[in-house]
């Protein structure tokens, strides 16, 4: 942080003395007022539900400008990374701060590929779940269970342990997600094949069977790799903040990432792409493209409970840069699979057209977001809707680890302890039983 010569002065209308608060300037983005001494000097806390105006940390990893529709990983625009790098290059960048050179790229890809298998006993752990369990319920358990199998990388304060855990998590998440899928389908697990790319290996573990191997379609593999890149990190969102808060207690890296997986499961967070696809399927069941006008009318009705899923974003007040990239991929995938005339996809494109042209949505900046397009792409590839959030977790794992590592290495980090505005009963005495 760079301290500014300018101070923020906080004054009170009740006659309390005013105080000066330090102001810090980031390399880009809003200035930050340092309120760490506020309570000590005034006896007052700030009140910020959802932490919408509070910087919980300093970070060098990801920057978002919601008004401009800009997303940077370590300073690099997401548009350049998604078109010029693969997911493992992006992982290296997020973990270590710079893009790998040719030798480092080769070494890192080899290192990750050597850790793709999981302990064989993990499959027995899986058998304890019902076959119809939601994949995120299964994945939360599997990721947490890794700490029971890999005791040599559970000290969160040991940089070597954290690095080993990082590689293991990045390498094994595709295997775990594929195992969760195969278990639910009643199919045998497919072991990883290290000669394939990261995304290609994942798709083979998903769709190959002992009786028929999977022939990777490069368009689909590239689409999956792009989904991973676009979801790799997104600043201090709910699941990332959960990982940081959990890790601040000193718990092991696997437990911290499992907490992130659990948070991501929420429909307002990682479940948004699942909700978008479910919305499209509901419209299709209720009359399809011919009834889309009625659906839009309900969305605009303030008294209606109908919501437009997959449009708009909490941070982006402009077109989500990830959505632009995912839109391109969406059309590539539909073209490669000959699905341009699929009824659900035609419905999705009709809804997209309305949202981009209708003044109601344009004025409110309800642009299609990355969840809208990634859900369509994953469905086209053959991934079931219930697995969408697990794939999001797979991609976000590297961001969570990078954020966790950054927090542990920050000399100013402390165990997280938010404050509250208490509005309950004042002190009172317990009355005798006959007087209650």
Image: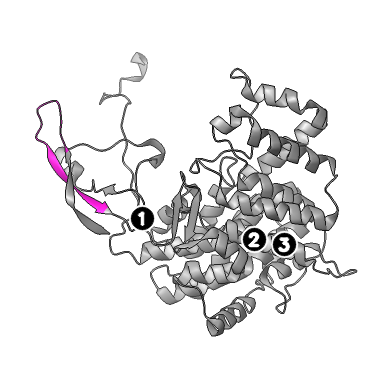
Q: Determine if the magenta segment contains residue 361.
A: no
Tell me where residue 276 sits by quadrant: top right
Give the mark, 1 or 3, whose residue is nearer the N terminus: 1
- Residue at left offset 64%, top offset 50%: 389
Quarter of the image for the N terminus: give it.
bottom left
Nearer to us: label 1 or label 3: 1
- In percent of width and height, residue 153 lies at 49, 73
Quarter of the image for the C terminus: give it.
top left
Q: Measured along the vertical axis of the image, is residue 153 above or below residue 128? A: below
Q: What element carries label 1?
A: loop
Numbered badge on residue 325:
none
- In percent of width and height, residue 165 lies at 51, 71
Numbered badge on residue 28:
1
Measured in 3D between alpha carbons, the distance from the residue under mark 1 to the one under mark 2, in whole angstroms, is: 26 Å
Asked if marks 1 and 3 touch (Cβ < 8 Å), the reply is no
Q: Which of 327 and 207 is in front in this view?
A: 327
Tell me where residue 203 sits by quadrant: bottom right
- Residue at left offset 57%, top offset 59%: 79
Give the residue at the far right of this rendering.
211
Give the residue at the far top of this rendering.
435
Q: Is mark 3 on a helix, strand or loop?
A: helix
User: Mark 2 highlights which residue?
Assistant: 226
Mark 3 closeness class: few <14, some 14–19, many ≥20 residues within 10 Å: many
Nearer to us: label 1 or label 2: 1
Start-end of magenta stretch: 10-24
Give the mark, 1 or 2, whose residue is nearer the N terminus: 1
User: Mark 3 highlights which residue?
Assistant: 178
Nearer to us: label 3 or label 2: 2
Give the mark, 3 or 2, whose residue is nearer the N terminus: 3
Q: Nearer the viewer, residue 44 or 34?
A: 34
């Amino acid at each position: 942080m760079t301290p500014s010569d300018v101070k923020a002065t906080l004054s009170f209308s009740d006659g309390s003395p005013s105080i000066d608060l330090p102001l810090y300037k980031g390399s880009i983005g809003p200035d930050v007022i340092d309120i760490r001494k506020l309570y000590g000097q005034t006896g007052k806390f700030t009140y910020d539900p959802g932490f919408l105006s509070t910087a919980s940390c300093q970070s060098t990893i990801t920057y978002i400008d919601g008004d401009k529709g800009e997303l940077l990983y370590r300073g690099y625009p997401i548009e350049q990374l998604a078109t010029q790098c693969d997911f493992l290059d992006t992982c290296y960048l997020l973990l270590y701060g710079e893009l790998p050179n040719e030798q480092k790229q080769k070494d890192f890809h080899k290192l990750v590929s050597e850790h793709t298998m999981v302990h064989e006993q993990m499959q027995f752990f899986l058998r304890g779940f019902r076959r119809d369990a939601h994949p995120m319920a299964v994945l939360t358990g599997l990721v947490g269970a890794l700490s029971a199998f890999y005791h040599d990388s559970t000290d969160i304060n040991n940089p070597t342990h954290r690095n080993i855990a990082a590689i293991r998590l990045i390498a094994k998440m595709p295997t775990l997600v594929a195992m969760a899928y195969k278990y639910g389908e009643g199919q045998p697990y497919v072991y990883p094949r290290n000669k394939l790319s990261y995304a290609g290996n994942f798709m083979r573990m998903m769709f190959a069977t002992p009786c028929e191997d999977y022939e990777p379609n490069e368009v689909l593999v590239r689409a999956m790799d792009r989904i991973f890149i676009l979801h790799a990190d997104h600043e201090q969102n709910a699941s990332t903040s959960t990982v940081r808060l959990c890790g601040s207690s000193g718990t092991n890296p696997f437990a911290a990432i499992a907490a992130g997986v659990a948070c991501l499961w929420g429909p307002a967070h990682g479940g948004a792409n699942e909700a978008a696809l479910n919305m499209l399927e509901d419209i299709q069941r209720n009359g399809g493209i011919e009834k889309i006008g009625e659906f839009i009318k309900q969305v605009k009705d303030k008294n209606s409970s109908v919501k437009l899923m997959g449009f708009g974003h909490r941070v982006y007040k402009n077109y989500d840069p990830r959505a632009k990239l995912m839109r391109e991929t969406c059309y590539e995938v539909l073209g490669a699979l000959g699905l341009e005339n699929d009824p659900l996809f035609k419905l999705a494109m009709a809804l997209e057209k309305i949202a981009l042209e209708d003044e109601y949505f344009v004025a409110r900046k309800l642009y299609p977001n990355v969840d809208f397009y990634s859900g369509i792409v994953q469905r086209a590839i053959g991934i079931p809707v219930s697995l969408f959030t697990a794939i999001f977790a797979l991609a976000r794992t590297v961001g969570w680890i990078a954020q966790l590592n950054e927090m542990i290495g920050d000399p100013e980090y402390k165990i997280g302890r938010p404050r509250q505005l208490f509005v309950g009963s004042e002190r009172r005495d317990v009355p005798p039983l006959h007087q209650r």
